């Protein structure tokens, strides 16, 4: 049996940041990732707000700077807002954060999945090379995304999620804004086109309770953009994934377990953005693990800090989402004014 002070499950931006912070502070850290290669395949539209740029300085991470956010309201009216940010190569971004954690002394095990947790005995069963083995930890950090097994094993409820489908397409006209479409075709979510040099990520997210099928509305938007000369007909890559939209989890820690990023419900319930919160909560969790190990500080302080930092914004966004939900669930159209009262950039 292996032992470690800190065990991190998942090496997305949340887990890598947590592992890096804890290792940097001198803790013994093992961080595991079920994928063979960190960050691959990418399941992201790859936009980060400008302040997060300080984490995107490694070679090959930053692809393009954006200046604005364009929102197409249901009537077709275009609303422009300043919103500076960066388009990144998300795989390179995640890999750079993981490399920093490794340089700080964390041991990173890829191709290694958490399969079972015995929280009462502080042991995790991991699966690598077709074999199970056990790791005993003092602190466990659940950074394992929207469907966190760490959360499930600890008895936390599943999170409500948006489902997404995204194509990478050739971009025929240079663009320096994120484009969003708010429309009844996308109940529970919206569609997007994010430019990335000569390519763009074109996708949509919906709540499957009200729109089970994602291909038809996405292809309809793609055809519209092809006809208007903005994108080419080729599909260069396909992806998708789940985005939690239930807001901050009511439980963010137990005695010696912490959740970060998507596993903690930190994605914004209206926009679905979650990279920045994953990185920052990861750092906070890494520091909380150090304080727990060094000074015996209760992990409740992490939950309080997270609540102070994100609680008000996420609760407001969740209330807005719940209001929009009254339209989606009855199949009622949402007009421009209602969307403008609830959308971040309109
Ligand atoms: C299509 C799509 C587009 C998005 N676009 C944006 C965007 O443009 N900007 C933005 O800010 N946010 C975006 N998001 C949200 C963003 O991707 C997430 O908020 C962010 O990845 C959260 O980071 P995380 O580290 O918490 O979780 P994740 O990035 O999900 O990382 C979790 C990791 O844990 C691993 N894992 C899971 N289970 C186990 C297990 N049992 N054992 C071992 N490892 C495990 C997974 O393989 C994964 O690598 C998008 C999401 C989707 C689905």
Image (cartoon, grey):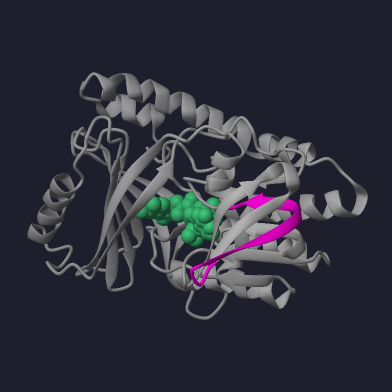
Instruction: Say which quarter of the image contains residue 331.
Output: top left
Q: Is residue 274 left or right of residue 288?
A: left
Q: How many marks?
A: 0
Q: Residue furthest bottom?
A: 59
Residue 70 covered by magenta stretch: no
330 vs 75, nearest the viewer: 330
Q: Quadrant of the C terminus?
A: top left
Q: Position of residue 209 (x, y in %)?
A: 27, 30
Q: Main secondary structure of the magenta part?
A: strand
Q: Is residue 177 visible to us here?
A: yes
Instruction: Say which quarter of the image contains residue 106.
Output: bottom right
Q: Position of residue 252 (x, y in %)?
A: 65, 38
> Taking 99 as reference, is 251 above or below it?
above
Residue 131 covered by magenta stretch: yes
Q: Residue at x 48, y 40 (%)?
A: 268
Q: Residue at x 79, y 66 (%)?
A: 28
100 vs 29, nearest the viewer: 29
Residue bounds of the magenta highlight: 128-143
Q: Position of residue 116 (x, y in %)?
A: 57, 50
Q: Is residue 83 visible to us here?
A: no
> Taking 140 as reference, is 27 above or below it?
below
Q: Residue at x 68, y 63 (%)?
A: 19
181 vs 135, nearest the viewer: 135
Instruction: Say which quarter of the image contains residue 108.
Output: bottom right
Q: Is residue 168 left or right of residue 155?
A: left
> Taking 276 as reference, is 182 above or below it?
above
Q: Is residue 105 left or right of residue 99?
A: right
Q: Quadrant of the N terminus?
A: bottom right
Q: Residue furthest right?
A: 295
Q: Is residue 151 left or right of residue 332?
A: right
């Amino acid at each position: 049996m292996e032992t470690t002070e800190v065990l991190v499950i998942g090496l997305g931006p949340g887990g890598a940041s947590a592992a890096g912070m804890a290792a940097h502070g001198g803790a013994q850290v093992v961080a595991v990732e079920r994928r063979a290669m960190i960050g691959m395949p990418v399941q992201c539209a790859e936009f980060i707000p400008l302040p997060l740029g300080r984490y995107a300085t490694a070679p090959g991470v930053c692809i393009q700077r954006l200046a604005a956010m364009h929102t197409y309201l249901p009537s077709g009216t275009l609303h422009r807002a300043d919103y500076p940010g960066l388009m990144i190569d998300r795989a390179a971004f995640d890999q750079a954060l993981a490399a920093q954690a490794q340089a700080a002394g964390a041991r990173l095990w890829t191709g290694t999945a958490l399969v079972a947790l015995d929280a009462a005995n502080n042991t995790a069963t991991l699966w690598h090379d077709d074999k199970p083995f056990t790791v005993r930890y003092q602190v466990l950090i659940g950074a394992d995304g929207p469907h966190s097994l760490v959360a499930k094993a600890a008895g936390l409820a599943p999170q409500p999620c948006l489902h997404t489908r995204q194509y990478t397409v050739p971009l025929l006209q240079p663009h320096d804004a994120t484009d969003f479409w708010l429309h009844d075709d996308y109940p529970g979510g919206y569609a997007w086109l994010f430019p990335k040099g000569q390519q763009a990520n074109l996708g949509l997210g919906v709540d499957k309770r009200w729109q089970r099928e994602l291909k038809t509305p996405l292809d309809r938007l793609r055809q519209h953009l092809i006809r208007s000369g903005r994108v080419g007909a080729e599909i260069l890559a396909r992806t998708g994934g789940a985005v939690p939209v239930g807001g901050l989890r009511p439980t963010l820690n137990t005695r010696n377990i912490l959740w970060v990023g998507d596993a903690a419900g930190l994605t914004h319930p209206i926009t679905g953005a979650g990279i920045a919160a994953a990185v920052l909560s990861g750092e906070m969790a890494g520091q909380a693990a150090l304080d727990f190990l060094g000074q015996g500080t209760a992990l409740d302080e992490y939950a309080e800090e997270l609540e102070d930092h994100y609680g008000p914004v996420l609760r407001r966004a969740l209330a807005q989402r719940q209001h929009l939900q009254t339209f989606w669930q009855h199949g009622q159209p949402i007009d421009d004014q209602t969307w403008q009262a609830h959308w971040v950039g309109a």
